[in-house]
Image (tube, grey):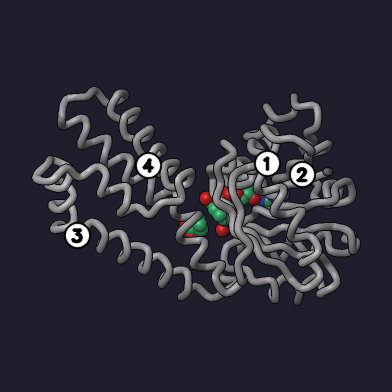
């Protein structure tokens, strides 16, 4: 596979790291206007750094677009004459619909819309994908790329905004929960480094328990909550203080924000 990541910022670089840690890519073009921040990637055998998006498009089969939403239209207009029917165009751009992209590129291209998260850099992204009509034939290819860097799910495009909140913003939400747990552990006497280690591995263990056992969270909670014990005492206090409710309200607030932002004008 010859891949180009167009717009190597926070997400683009995370994807680049994920690709470099996985197999199957023979050529990886990384583009941005100022290459200084990614100079160190020049040393990788398969990597070419360039400010020239047209060069990257000409030399790649799969184009992963990771610029800011306001930068996408100009970007597509810059290289659309080079696109062939074989290119697979994978957008990661928030709020930019397939219809918006087809208005610029036409419908005769394989267009995949994706929503990964920054854990893609360590091969652990939850990535949601959908496609235009022509791109349906390339969905399996897109899935195989993202599955090498975590887990993927094909969803209808009208759920993409919700997936953005749960999966992409979700990284920030879970980080804050891990941070809060860390602060609790420090208050109980662990030093900061130990506290974070305890919090993040417990979080990872809880998620993996569900992934590997396919059980329901409440089933696992029942196994931990000894009658009259400390776990149920703490859990109930958290709920009295609104833990589940505040998480749900935060998710809905995030969704309301993303829904209010007019497509194309993020
Ligand atoms: N951050 C996240 O966790 C997630 C982000 N997204 C989406 O991914 C996209 C990127 O987000 P994020 O990485 O945070 O944004 P950044 O601003 O960090 O990255 C965008 C990059 O694009 C580069 N760029 C801008 N214009 C061009 C151009 N014409 N040609 C080549 N490169 C260009 C910029 O570098 P330079 O200025 O040097 O050109 C910059 O590094 C957004 O659309 C966002 O909605 C989706 C899911 C998660
Ligand atoms: O916060 C944002 O708006 C973008 C979309 C998902 C992650 N970052």
Q: Label 3: how many residues lie within 10 Å, few (<14), some (14-19) or many (20+)? A: few
The response on whether ligand 1 sits within 8 Å of label 2 is yes
Q: Are marks 1 and 2 in contact (CB under 8 Å)?
A: yes
Q: Is residue 220 above or below residue 184?
A: below
Q: Are marks 3 and 2 in contact (CB under 8 Å)?
A: no
What percent of the width, then of the height, locates residue 60? 85, 47
Q: Label 4: how many residues lie within 10 Å, few (<14), some (14-19) or many (20+)? A: few
Quarter occupied by the N terminus: top right
Q: Earlier in the sequence, mark 3 or mark 2?
A: 2
| Picture residue at 89% right of the left edge, 50% below the top | 58
Q: Residue furthest left?
A: 228
Q: Earlier in the sequence, mark 4 or mark 1?
A: 1
The response on whether ligand 1 sits within 8 Å of label 1 is yes
| Picture residue at 81% right of the left edge, 70% below the top | 134
Callout 4 secondary element: helix
The span from disc 1 to disc 2 (Cα, nearest Å) is: 7 Å
Q: Which residue is mark 4?
A: 206
Q: Which residue is mark 1?
A: 34
The response on whether ligand 2 sits within 8 Å of label 3 is no
Q: Is residue 189 above or below residue 236?
A: above
For residue 203, which numbered disc appears in the image? none
Quarter occupied by the C terminus: bottom right
Q: Earlier in the sequence, mark 4 or mark 3?
A: 4
| Picture residue at 34% right of the left edge, 35% below the top | 202
The span from disc 4 to disc 2 (Cα, nearest Å) is: 43 Å
Callout 3 secondary element: loop
Q: Which residue is mark 3?
A: 242
- Look at discs 1 and 3 and give the one toward the viewer: 3
């Amino acid at each position: 596979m010859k891949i180009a990541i167009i717009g190597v910022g926070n997400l683009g670089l995370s994807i680049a790291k994920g690709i470099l840690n996985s197999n199957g890519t023979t050529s990886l073009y990384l583009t941005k206007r100022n290459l200084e921040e990614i100079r160190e990637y020049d040393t990788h055998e398969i990597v070419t750094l360039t400010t020239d998006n047209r060069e990257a498009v000409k030399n790649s089969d799969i184009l992963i677009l990771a610029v800011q939403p306001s930068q996408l239209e100009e970007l597509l207009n810059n290289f659309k004459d080079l696109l062939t029917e074989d290119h697979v165009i994978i957008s990661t751009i928030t709020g930019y619909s397939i219809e918006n992209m087809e208005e610029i590129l036409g419908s005769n291209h394989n267009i995949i819309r994706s929503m990964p998260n920054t854990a893609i850099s360590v091969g652990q992204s939850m990535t949601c994908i959908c496609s235009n009509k022509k791109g349906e034939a390339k969905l399996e290819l897109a899935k195989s790329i993202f599955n090498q860097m975590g887990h993927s799910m094909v969803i209808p495009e009208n759920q993409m905004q919700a997936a953005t909140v749960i999966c992409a913003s979700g990284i920030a939400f879970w980080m804050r929960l891990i941070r809060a747990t860390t602060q609790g552990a420090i208050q109980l006497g662990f030093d900061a480094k130990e506290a974070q280690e305890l919090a993040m591995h417990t979080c990872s263990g809880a998620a993996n328990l569900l992934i590997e056992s396919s059980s329901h969270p409440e089933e696992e909670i029942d196994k931990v909550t000894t009658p009259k014990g400390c776990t149920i005492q703490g859990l109930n206090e958290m709920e009295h203080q609104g833990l589940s409710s505040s998480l749900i309200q935060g998710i809905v607030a995030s969704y309301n924000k993303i829904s209010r932002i007019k497509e194309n004008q993020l």
